[in-house]
């Protein structure tokens, strides 16, 4: 996976929710990953303690207790990144960072169809980016546009069409921010089920695929390009 992503001009920041293991994380970094994605603050703390660089927490860390723990990590690992989807949350992070004289790297999570978290594409994302850019303690890095539903669509062509439709929203949002003078240096997302689709669309520049480490029956079930299994034609 690391070689594939690198050969397609992207970075790999694999998601650790599949393994939750610093030893495997180190092997991924050694293979060429630029960092690690994690789902929870607990996972971030464990990986940071193990010295894993470039950690991105892919879910929002809301409330004083979690933010306090986050800042303890970022004090030792200033390359940490977190996602936001709400102006009130942005203010919480900014105030806490100011109090501890730190600067936090943030991405806006854009809702790509899951309707769980994230800002709506387009105008709402632009408005939140403008709020972030006005704070002195937060550094706007880019967007998280993870089209998770696309990863499990059965049949390659159907999955490709689903992913293209979802990521069109990401592209339009990126263009809107750029037109308004906001640089989008990082667009992170993607998964094992769509790695070979998103790498060819060139809409995101960082892949968060994580299940590829072990794979599972679902990725055999959905099938790969031209009916092949994902990653290999000999899935055992």
Image (cartoon, rainbow, N blue to C red):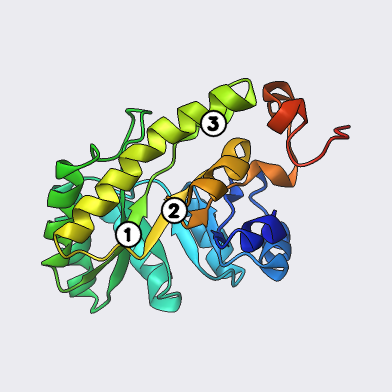
Within 10 Å of the Cα at label 3, are there few (<14), some (14-19), or many (20+) other Cα atoms?
A: many
Q: Distance between the residues labelled 1 and 3?
A: 24 Å
Q: Name the residue under label 2.
A: 188
> Is mark 1 in CB contact (under 8 Å) with mark 3?
no
Q: Is residue 166 left or right of residue 157?
A: left
Indicate the position of residue 50 as horizontal and vertical percent values.
62, 68
Within 10 Å of the Cα at label 2, are there few (<14), some (14-19), or many (20+) other Cα atoms?
A: many
For label 3, the SS is helix
Please tell me the numbered disc located at residue 160: 3
Q: Foreground: 167 or 101?
A: 167
User: Which residue sits at x=33%, y=46%?
Assistant: 171
> Is mark 2 in CB contact (under 8 Å) with mark 1?
yes
Q: Foreground: 20 or 211?
A: 211
For label 1, the SS is strand
Indicate the position of residue 163 as horizontal and vertical percent values.
47, 33
- Ranked by sequence position, the earlier of labels 2 and 1 is 1
Indicate the position of residue 98 as horizontal and vertical percent values.
18, 73
Q: Is residue 140 left or right of residue 215?
A: left
- Residue 187 figure quarter: bottom left
Q: How far apart are marks 2 and 1 (CA)?
A: 8 Å
Asked if residue 236 is positioned above or below residue 23 in the image, the reply reads above
- Ranked by sequence position, the earlier of labels 2 and 3 is 3
Q: Name the residue under label 1.
A: 142
Indicate the position of residue 40 as horizontal and vertical percent values.
46, 48
User: Which residue sits at x=33%, y=50%?
Assistant: 61
């Amino acid at each position: 996976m690391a070689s594939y992503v690198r050969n397609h001009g992207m970075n790999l920041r694999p998601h650790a929710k599949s393994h939750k293991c610093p030893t495997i994380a180190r092997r991924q970094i050694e293979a060429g990953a630029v960092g690690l994605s994690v789902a929870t603050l607990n996972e971030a703390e464990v990986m940071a303690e193990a010295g894993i660089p470039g950690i991105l927490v892919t879910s929002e860390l809301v409330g004083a207790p979690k933010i306090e723990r986050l800042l303890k990590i970022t004090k030792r690992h200033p390359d940490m990144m977190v996602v936001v989807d709400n102006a009130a949350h942005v203010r919480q992070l900014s105030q806490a960072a100011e109090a501890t004289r730190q600067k936090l790297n943030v991405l806006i999570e854009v809702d790509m169809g899951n309707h769980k978290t994230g800002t709506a594409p387009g105008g709402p994302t632009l408005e939140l980016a403008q709020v972030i850019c006005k704070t002195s303690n937060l550094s706007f890095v880019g967007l998280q546009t993870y089209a998770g539903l696309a990863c499990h669509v059965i049949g390659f062509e159907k999955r490709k069409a689903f992913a293209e439709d979802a990521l069109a929203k990401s592209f339009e949002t990126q263009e809107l921010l750029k037109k308004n003078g906001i640089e989008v240096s990082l667009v992170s997302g993607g998964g094992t089920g769509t790695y070979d689709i998103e790498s060819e669309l060139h809409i995101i520049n960082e892949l968060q695929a994580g299940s590829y480490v072990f794979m599972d029956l679902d990725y055999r079930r959905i099938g790969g390009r031209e009916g092949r299994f994902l990653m290999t034609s000999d899935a055992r």
